[in-house]
């Protein structure tokens, strides 16, 4: 179970309904893997977990063409990426070559091996965890890889009473979670997200935020169009989760950092500099009435 992190759980659900992928970043031992695995089981469908290490190869994730022991010819052996929900645990412990193997899968929902394209199951969701970059044995995720994650969330340390409950229960444990939805139900919820309305003034507010990120002197590179689209989809999903069929400016403000901070490049070091710059842009940006 994940105790005392209701806001993180809510945004994880937002990521699912928006049809995106989720990146959980924090120090080891605060429940990242527990959250990812519990979310995967709640969604039903097929589930696989990949524990990334520095010696992994792309074929270990995608699969490979091997000799078929039955037919005597060659056959494609599917890798763990072929699942509805893939838990990519400690994704930044593998080399950039293996990290890049996920790009096509996350963006196109398919993989190409030995000149043949294989479709991934639908729905398809990657929930990745990573340790901070200053930890031993980690490789920074390429910008193109980060751009494929709809939201980047940080677990943070639990509050005292939540941590007390973890201690008394014997540590982080993955509860026996029954699937909350099946495939058709999830598809219907995702379809409802697409029809959530966004007023033109709220769209202008979002676009102005993205535009200012591209001209702000504290940022070397601002948010891309993919980043703007990710924020747009996430806001619609958040509105649906909270029982609304329309987006409000507060949705944009709440999701601006989780959806954009990992996509921009600050002049300072680290994600904190990006979050600080975006926070100050939001502070100066008047919200529509």
Image: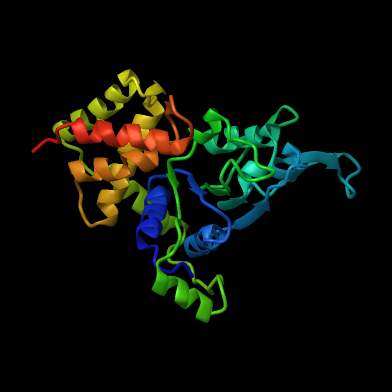
Q: Answer yes or no: is residue 247 visible.
A: no
Q: Residue at x 34, y 30 (%)?
A: 228
Q: Residue at x 8, y 38 (%)?
A: 289
What color scheme is it? Answer: rainbow
Q: Residue at x 59, y 53 (%)?
A: 87
Image spot of residue 110 (x, y percent)? 59, 36
Taking the image as shown, residue 253 lies to the left or right of residue 66, namely: left
Image-quadrant location for residue 185: bottom left
Nearer-the-camera pick, 156 or 150: 156
Image-quadrant location for residue 230: top left
Q: How many marks?
A: 0
Nearer-the-camera pick, 169 or 124: 169
Image spot of residue 250 (x, y percent)? 20, 45
Image-quadrant location for residue 118: top right
Image spot of residue 2 (x, y percent)? 46, 67
Q: Is residue 234 above or below residue 5?
A: above
């Amino acid at each position: 179970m994940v105790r005392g992190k209701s806001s993180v759980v809510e945004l994880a659900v937002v990521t699912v309904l928006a049809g995106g992928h989720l990146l959980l970043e924090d120090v080891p031992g605060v429940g990242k893997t527990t959250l990812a695995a519990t979310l995967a089981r709640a969604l039903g469908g097929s589930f696989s977990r990949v524990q990334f290490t520095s010696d992994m190869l792309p074929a270990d994730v995608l699969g490979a063409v091997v000799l078929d022991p039955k037919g005597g010819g060659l056959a494609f052996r599917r890798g763990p990426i072929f699942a509805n929900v893939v838990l990519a645990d400690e994704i930044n412990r593998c080399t950039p070559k293996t990290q890049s193997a996920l790009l096509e899968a996350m963006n196109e929902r398919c993989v190409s091996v030995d000149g043949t394209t294989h479709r991934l199951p639908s729905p398809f969701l990657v929930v990745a965890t990573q340790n901070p970059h200053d930890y031993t044995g980690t490789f920074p995720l390429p910008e193109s890889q980060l751009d494929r994650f709809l939201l980047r969330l940080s677990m943070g340390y639990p509050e005292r009473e939540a941590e007390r409950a973890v201690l008394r229960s014997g540590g982080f444990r993955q509860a026996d979670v029954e699937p909350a939805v099946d495939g058709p139900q999830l598809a219907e919820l995702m379809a409802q997200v697409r029809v959530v309305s966004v007023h033109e003034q709220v769209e202008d507010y979002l676009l102005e935020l993205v535009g200012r990120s591209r001209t702000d002197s504290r940022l070397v590179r601002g948010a891309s169009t993919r980043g703007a689209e990710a924020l747009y989809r996430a806001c619609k999903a958040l509105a649906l989760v909270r029982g609304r069929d329309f987006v409000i400016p507060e949705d944009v403000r709440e999701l601006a950092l989780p959806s954009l901070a990992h996509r921009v490049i600050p002049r300072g070091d680290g994600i904190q500099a990006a979050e600080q710059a975006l926070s100050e842009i939001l502070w100066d940006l008047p919200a529509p009435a």
